[in-house]
């Protein structure tokens, strides 16, 4: 009888261990599935944030390009205006010299013209836009 009880207790223990192992396997599989789903969510969130960051960088880059384009246009316009003023002054002095003004008078005319225009800053503005 004792042997039968021991055998029955051993079967119950074996069944209990088998059931516990199955429960553990099921729990492990569920955990791995949840981890896989969580990793997919993290990957999606990472891609969304990277896309958002790329859009922000693209916006800033476009803003910078527009600013540089405006600055280049302004510098080009300033250079053109300055060159035109210098050419006008040269034409005026040349005309005066052709009419018989002495060379010294030509220099004084140039000095007077430069003084009238005033000294302009040669540096670019600090801010764009």
Image (tube, rainbow, N blue to C red):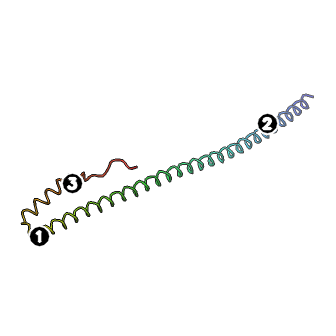
Residue name at image x 57 percent, y 47 percent:
49
Disc 3 element = helix
At numbered mark 2, what does the secondary structure look like: helix, strand or loop? helix
Relative to 58, is 76 on the left or the right?
Answer: left
Cα–Cα gap, marks 3 and 2: 96 Å
Task: Tell which tag, 3 or 2, sits nearer the viewer.
Answer: 3
Residue at point 18%, 65% (across, down): 92
Pointers 3 and 2 in contact (C-beta within 8 Å): no
Q: x, y (%) of residue 37?
A: 69, 45
Mark 3 against mark 1, which lies toward the viewer?
1
Q: Which residue is mark 1?
A: 99
Residue 94: image x %, image y %?
15, 68
Residue 29 image point, x, y percent: 74, 44
Furthest residue toward front: 99
Secondary structure, mark 1, is loop
Q: Label 2, on which residue?
A: 20
Name the image quarter holding residue 28: top right
């Amino acid at each position: 009888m004792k042997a039968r009880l021991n055998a029955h207790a051993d079967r119950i223990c074996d069944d209990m261990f088998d059931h516990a192992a199955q429960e553990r396997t099921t729990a492990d599989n569920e955990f791995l599935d949840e981890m896989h789903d969580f990793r997919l969510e993290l990957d999606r969130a990472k891609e969304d944030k990277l896309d958002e960051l790329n859009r922000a960088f693209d916006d800033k880059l476009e803003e910078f390009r527009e600013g540089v384009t405006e600055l280049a246009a302004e510098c080009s316009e300033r250079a053109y205006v300055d060159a035109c003023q210098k050419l006008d002054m040269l034409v005026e002095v040349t005309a005066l010299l052709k009419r018989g003004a002495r060379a010294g008078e030509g220099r004084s005319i140039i000095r007077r013209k430069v003084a009238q225009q005033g000294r302009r800053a040669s540096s670019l503005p600090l801010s764009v836009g």
